Image (cartoon, helix red, strand yellow):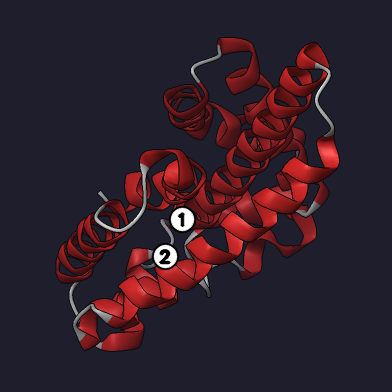
C-alpha cells in the first residue's frame, strides 16, 4: 500500500485535532473528484452535491481516526461509494412504491417477488464467481466482501496494482456475461446497478 503523502499526513493529523483550515484544504483537494463520481452514477447535480457534503461531514465526525488511515484517498472514495450505493437503493425503492401507489397495486406481493428474485440473483452470482479463475475469484471477493482497495488487494496477494485492475475488470465482464446469458434483463437490472460502482472504481 502506498505511503500517505507527508503533507496529507500533516493535514489529517491537524484535522484530528480540530483544525478547520486543514479540513478545508482536504475538502478543496477532493470534493470535485467525489462530486464527479456521484454525478456520474446518480445523474443529479443536487444529489451529487448532497453526497459530497454527507461524505465530508462523516470525515469530520470521524476526524480522531484519520491519522490511523494509511491510504486516505482510497478510504475516502470507498466512503463515497457507500453513500452513492445507499442513495441508489433508496431511490429505486421510492420509485417502486410511487409506481405502485399510482397504479393502486398491493406492495406486499411485489416485495415477496422481489425477495425471490434477489435470492435467485445471489445464487446466480455465486455460480458466476465459481466460474472465475482462482486469481479472479480472490480479487473479486477481497474487493466485494472485504471492500479492500486495489492497492490493499495487491499487497495481500503479492501482485501489482495494475494486475489487480486487470483481474477485476475481467472478473466483472465474466460475471456480467454469465448472468446475462441466464436471466432476462428485467431480473438483472438490480444486480447490474449493484455492481456498477465496483466496476467503475476498478477501472
| Vertical side of 35 occupied by 179: above or below | below
- Residue 139 lies left or right of residue 97; in this view the side is left
Q: Nearer the viewer, residue 118 or 145?
A: 118
**Residue 67 location, x and y as percent?**
64, 64
The Cα atoms of the two marked residues, 2 and 1, are separated by 6 Å
Q: Foreground: 94 or 7?
A: 94
Q: Quadrant of residue 92?
A: top right
Q: Is residue 68 left or right of residue 111?
A: left
Residue 162 image offset from top left, x and y in percent: 16, 64
Q: Which residue is mark 1?
A: 74
Q: Nearer the viewer, residue 79 or 64?
A: 79
Q: Name the N-terminal-most of marks 2 and 1.
A: 1
Res 145 visible: yes
Residue at image mark 2: 149
Give the quadrant of residue 1: bottom left
Which quarter of the picture shows residue 86?
top right
- The circle drawn on residue 90 is none
**Residue drawn at point x = 83 percent, y = 36 percent:** 107
Q: Residue at x 34, y 44 (%)?
A: 200
Residues at discs 2 and 1 in contact (Cβ within 8 Å): yes
Task: Mark 2: give few (<14), some (14-19) or many (20+) Cα within 10 Å.
Answer: many
In the picture provided, is 96 more to the left or to the right than 38? Answer: right
Residue 41 position, x and y percent, is 46, 29
Q: Is residue 152 above or below residue 25?
A: below
What residue sits 63% from the left and 29% below the top? 52
Identify the secondary structure beneath mark 2.
loop
User: Going 39% across and 67% down the picture, which residue do you hit?
Assistant: 3
Amino acid at each position: 500500500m502506498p505511503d500517505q503523502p507527508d503533507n496529507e499526513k500533516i493535514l489529517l493529523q491537524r484535522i484530528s485535532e480540530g483544525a478547520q483550515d486543514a479540513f478545508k484544504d482536504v475538502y478543496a483537494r477532493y470534493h470535485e473528484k467525489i462530486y464527479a463520481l456521484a454525478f456520474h452514477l446518480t445523474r443529479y447535480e443536487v444529489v451529487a452535491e448532497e453526497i459530497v457534503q454527507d461524505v465530508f461531514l462523516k470525515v469530520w465526525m470521524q476526524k480522531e481516526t484519520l491519522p490511523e488511515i494509511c491510504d486516505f484517498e482510497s478510504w475516502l472514495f470507498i466512503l463515497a461509494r457507500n453513500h452513492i450505493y445507499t442513495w441508489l437503493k433508496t431511490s429505486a425503492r421510492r420509485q417502486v412504491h410511487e409506481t405502485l401507489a399510482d397504479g393502486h397495486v398491493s406492495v406486499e406481493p411485489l416485495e415477496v417477488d422481489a425477495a425471490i428474485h434477489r435470492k435467485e440473483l445471489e445464487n446466480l452470482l455465486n455460480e458466476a464467481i465459481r466460474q472465475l479463475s482462482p486469481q479472479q475469484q480472490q480479487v473479486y471477493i477481497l474487493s466485494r466482501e472485504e471492500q479492500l482497495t486495489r492497492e490493499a488487494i495487491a499487497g495481500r496477494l503479492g501482485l501489482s496494482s495494475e494486475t489487480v485492475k486487470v483481474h477485476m475488470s475481467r472478473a466483472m465482464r465474466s460475471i456480467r456475461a454469465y448472468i446475462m446469458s441466464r436471466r432476462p434483463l428485467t431480473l438483472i437490472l438490480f444486480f447490474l446497478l449493484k455492481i456498477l460502482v465496483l466496476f467503475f472504481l476498478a477501472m
